Image (cartoon, helix red, strand yellow):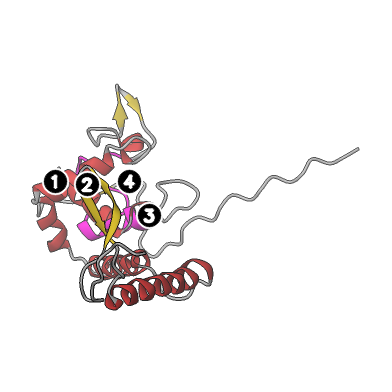
């Protein structure tokens, strides 16, 4: 015989066990809660299949990378059309100059060939790079000309500086240019180096490979 008092279905039901004076309800979960759980499970399975198994759709990381790439492309496009006046203005911006100095002084970067003081020497020894602190320039001393050389490299493919745009990006190239210009004054005379290429002259072609030695 059931000794538990009868109760309506709307009244709370309690389990028989008691732990530390605490009883546990024995109620069915509300339908809205169960439906929310079931929909969440179905949504998770669909999301897992689409994004991680079938490659359908793009994740939040993909969307973020896309936005960052668009912003970088827009910034690079704006920097590509930079003028002498803008580069001189950057050379007077401490933040831009400091960013350019950090790149310039990174081991394996500009400092390796041009020296920490931009003289093209280190402890009296001549380095491969040209001095950047004086008014003598081989490929032009205007800010945009310096900017172009850093971006695209030396016109002479047999020697000279390599192109840094692919390594640094346009923004860092402009910052490096600003750092170099910070060692100069706007309007100072620009002297052409004795070995500067003649305007309109084609860059020298690479030296031909030596012919193979004859075999006996």
Indicate which label's residue lies in the foreground, 1 or 4.
Answer: 1
Q: Are marks 1 and 2 in contact (CB under 8 Å)?
A: yes
User: Which of the labelled discs sits on residue 182, or is there none?
Assistant: 1
Marks 1 and 2 sit apart, C-alpha to C-alpha, by 10 Å
Q: Which residue is mark 3?
A: 197
Indicate which label's residue lies in the foreground, 1 or 2.
Answer: 2
Name the N-terminal-most of marks 2 and 4. 2
User: Which of the labelled discs sits on residue 100, or is there none?
Assistant: 2
- Circle 2 SS class: helix
From the top left corner, tell me how far across and down residue 140 is, in percent: 27, 55
Name the N-terminal-most of marks 1 and 2. 2
Marks 1 and 4 sit apart, C-alpha to C-alpha, by 24 Å
Name the N-terminal-most of marks 1 and 4. 1
Crowd band around label 2 with a 10 angstrom C-alpha radius: few (<14), some (14–19), many (20+): many
From the top left corner, tell me how far across and down residue 187 is, in percent: 9, 54
Question: Does residue 173 appear in this view?
Answer: yes
What residue sits 18% from the left and 51% below the top? 178
Marks 3 and 1 sit apart, C-alpha to C-alpha, by 26 Å
Q: Are marks 3 and 4 in contact (CB under 8 Å)?
A: no
The magenta segment is: 130-152
From the top left corner, tell me how far across and down residue 68 is, in percent: 29, 65
- Left or right: residue 128 compared with residue 147: right
Is 200 magenta? The answer is no
- The quadrant in which the N terminus is found is bottom left
Marks 2 and 3 sit apart, C-alpha to C-alpha, by 28 Å
Q: Which residue is mark 4?
A: 194
From the top left corner, tell me how far across and down residue 106 is, in percent: 30, 37
- Circle 3 SS class: loop
Indicate which label's residue lies in the foreground, 2 or 4.
Answer: 2
- Circle 1 SS class: loop
């Amino acid at each position: 015989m059931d000794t538990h008092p009868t109760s309506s279905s709307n009244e709370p039901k309690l389990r028989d066990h008691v732990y530390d004076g605490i009883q546990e309800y024995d109620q069915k979960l509300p339908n809205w809660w169960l439906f929310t759980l079931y929909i969440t499970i179905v949504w998770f399975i669909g999301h897992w299949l689409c994004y991680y198994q079938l490659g359908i759709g793009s994740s939040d990381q993909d969307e973020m990378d896309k936005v960052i790439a668009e912003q970088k492309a827009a910034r690079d496009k704006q920097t590509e059309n930079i003028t002498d006046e803008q580069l001189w203005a950057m050379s007077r911006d401490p933040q831009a100059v400091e960013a350019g100095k950090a790149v310039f002084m990174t081991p394996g970067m500009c400092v390796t060939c041009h020296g920490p003081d931009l003289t093209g020497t280190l402890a009296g020894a001549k380095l491969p790079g040209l001095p950047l602190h004086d008014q003598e320039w081989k490929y032009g001393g205007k800010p945009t000309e310096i900017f172009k050389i850093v971006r695209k490299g030396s016109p002479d493919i047999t020697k000279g500086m390599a192109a840094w745009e692919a390594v640094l990006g346009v923004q860092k190239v402009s910052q490096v240019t600003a750092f170099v210009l910070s060692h100069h004054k706007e309007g100072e005379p620009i002297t052409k180096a004795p070995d500067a290429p003649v305007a309109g002259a084609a860059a020298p072609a690479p030296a031909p490979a030596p012919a193979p030695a004859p075999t006996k």
